[in-house]
Amino acid sequence: MSRIVIIGGGPAGYEAALVAAQLDADVTVVEADGAGGACVLHDCVPSKTFIASSDVVTGYRDTEEFGIHSDGLEAITVDAPVVYSRVKRLALAQSGDIQAKLIKAGVTLVRGTARLGEDTLGHTHRVRVRPEDSDAEYSVDASTVLIATGATPRRLPSAVPDGERILTWRQVYDLPKLPEHLIVIGSGVTGAEFASAYLAMGVPVTLVSSRDRVMPHEDADAAMAIERVFRTRGMTILNNSRADAVKRVGDTVEVTLSDGRMVTGSHALMAVGSIPNTADLGLTEYGVNVAPGGYVAVDRVSRTNVPGIYAAGDCTGVLPLASVAAMQGRIAMWHALGEAVAPLRLRTVAANVFTDPELATVGVSQADVDSGKTPARQVMLPLAGNARAKMAGLDDGFIKLFCRPASGIVVGGVVVSPRASELIMPLTMAVENHMTVDQLAHTITIYPSLSGSIAEAARQLMLHDVE
């Protein structure tokens, strides 16, 4: 029987463990925080639960348009301790569900840390395990080791989080009340999501962005559309502004920008990226190649340069999505245990930003098309022309579709809309299965529905419309 040791119990680790157990391997997972890892306990699950609370508040916006009269958002109160308690409770419940599933599958769970040993015994890798409740290490020899240790919020020396006024995104759930004025440092996905959620809850938000728009690595049309919504709803966005330092002054924080300006608020949320948790694993000593920044170098089947050592998830720097981490972990186990497996294909991975409205993408990007890297025809349909969107009062958002110039094969799409994370699915299936716009166009959609705009976009790209 193959023995597998997985260091890290997040999406990469626990999904890999389930695959390996299904293939009759002896599997041990070593995780410091609990089943599900940081993703479930501190990052993805908590943040999306928090955003769900902000979505409830959003439902009370502009109700007069629908003939429903209320006192507006001013009458809505948010009980922060209840919100944060629900976030933590659901995270623990999800972790418990994952733990139960692993135990049922026969996986051995160890609460603690692990690192690679000092030597290799033939084709066996020695892993040193330190349980949480003991100072005594013990060794486990395995035919395959998966490194799935994730990443941690980046901390800047000039803006050290104190957990009270200067915060990482993992610390916001310990606040006794909502911030009076939140300054978000960093306008990437994480910064934009928290800025959107707190704004919806009635918190004045200042978003400090070092680039000329929020979410600079996302589709430009989509990012600018969401930025317009942010500004319309009262968010202060400081573009082309870099925070040099964040200092606590009593019950306030002072953010010094690189041009000398000072921004003052009650709290600062640091959203300046993550660093991989690879420093204490003994990788370099074991001969595993570690790329600049501490990321474990892997190929498309999750192999490192050392036979039998695999890595998956955020510690690899491939694409920081839970869905990608999980697939990397599964692929690693399928490959290690001799199953037929297709290498990871990032071109078919859908991603979503949980702002309001949401931003979802799949396949080729607008930048790929504009640069000539990927020849494509495209169309962009505003949601404002969609019957269901009119009924729901949705003025912001669009559907964008890319296809091959000659064949009409769908190669990418962008959705800006409420629940874009759901609407992107048909486009993801189209990209994955090499469907054509003709096939999408001939698919009968519900009327009225937001998904009808996907078929409409496809109809506008059908080959007989090309001159």
Image (tube, rainbow, N blue to C red):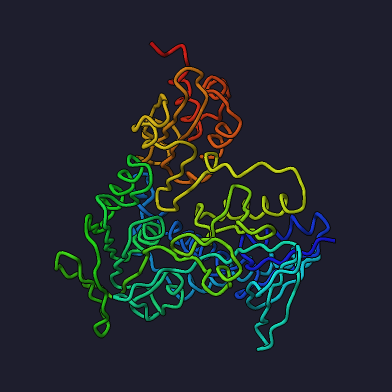
Q: Outermost residue, left direction?
A: 260
Measured as percent of width and height from the top left, residue 395 is found at: 34, 40
Depth order, front residue of 3/63: 3
Depth order, front residue of 220/259: 259
Measured as percent of width and height from the top left, residue 400 is found at: 41, 33
Measured as percent of width and height from the top left, residue 321 is found at: 52, 54
Q: Quadrant of the N terminus?
A: bottom right
Q: Quadrant of the C terminus?
A: top left
Q: Outermost residue, bottom direction?
A: 135
Q: Is residue 71 in view?
A: no
* Image quarter of residue 190: bottom left
Measured as percent of width and height from the top left, residue 362 is found at: 49, 39
100 is higher (above) or lower (below) than 137:
above
Q: Residue at x 58, y 65 (%)?
A: 40
- In the picture, measured across the screen, residue 262 lies left or right of residue 418, that is left
- In the picture, measured across the screen, residue 408 lies left or right of residue 390, that is right
- In the picture, measured across the screen, residue 231 lies left or right of residue 426, that is left
Q: Residue at x 48, y 72 (%)?
A: 84
- In the picture, measured across the screen, residue 84 lies left or right of residue 102, that is left
* Image quarter of residue 377: top left
Q: Is residue 124 in view?
A: yes
